[in-house]
Amino acid sequence: MDNMNPEVTTPNKRFSVIIPAYNIEEYIERAIKSVENQTYKNFEIIVVNDASTDKTGQIIKEINKLYDNIIYIEREVNKRLGASRNIALDVATGEYIVFLDGDDYLSNNYVLEKLDKLINEDKTDVVYLGFKIEGNKNELVIPTQETCTKMYKIAKDEYPNVWSKCWNREFLEKNQIRFPEERLYEDVLFIYKSIMNSKTYKIADFMTHNYVRGRKGSITTKITLKNVEDTINNLKDLEEIREKEPSEEINAVIEREVIKCKKRLDQAVEAIFDKE
């Protein structure tokens, strides 16, 4: 059973900022404060603590006492990112969804203000966001017309993640788009389905997120057979989609995931023998 603070109601919000959290006691306060410090205030924050075993939950509860716009959900069993994001989507009221991983943070205090002005009165399905990578790699990634085609975003993007897009919640609900649960690389299917169904988009050619890469304990820093298994599960689901809706895009994303599967298998095998 999950625990939620039901007394928090935040109707008619422009943005719902969804923050999943698992064993990130060193980072979670920074993530939440980067949202609370925004100059634009018409938002809610939904924080999902995915059964953390460190002080993450305690820190979130202390922060929650300071603000009245945080919906805090505490999971008793770890279900991974997909499940955390899904339960947050189920309770979100915002017109637009912004995903923020708990070890990342918004780049400055004007992110939501600039997004609000960019979207304006339009009902854009998706807004492609700029971001900065820090940690074991430093890079600034700013979207352009060339990098915002469906083919590029689905199959060629070096960083195919959900937090580098701002999503129209009504669009996601209409197309019944959710994450696979208890699976790594849950972004793959979500991104494919959402981008293929999208009709309109805008480009935020400015930094919105600081993405911390190479953090100790991240799934990208330790490859096991679980990583391989879930890549194969994604491939199975993608193949089912291809049988029903063949396209150039689905062929390209399957080819990309097969290459990644081979690489992850090599890494997992190497890690197994290193242990021995």
Image (tube, rainbow, N blue to C red):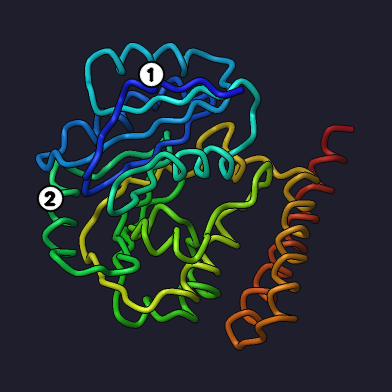
Q: Residue 6 lies in what quarter of the image?
A: top left
Mark 2 crowdedness (10 Å alpha carbons): few <14, some 14-19, many ≥20:
some
Q: Nearer the viewer, residue 68 or 127?
A: 68
Q: Residue 267 carries which label?
A: none
Along the line of sight, which residue is nearer the eye, 230 or 15?
15
> Is the N terminus in the top left, top right, bottom left or bottom right quadrant?
top right
> Is the residue under label 2 in contact with that under label 1 (CB below 8 Å)?
no
Q: From the viewer's perspective, tell me whether residue 90 is left or right of residue 110.
A: right
Amino acid under disc 1: Ile
Vertical order, 251 against 107 (above or below): below
Name which residue lies at 32% across and 44% down.
93
Identified at 45% across, 58% down, the residue is: 173
Query: In the figure, 172 relative to 45: above or below?
Result: below
> How far from the left and from the top, in percent, is residue 245?
65, 83
User: Can you identify the residue that label 2 sits on?
Assistant: 113
Indicate which disc, 1 or 2, sits on the residue closer to the N terminus: 1
Reading the image, the residue beneath label 1 is 60
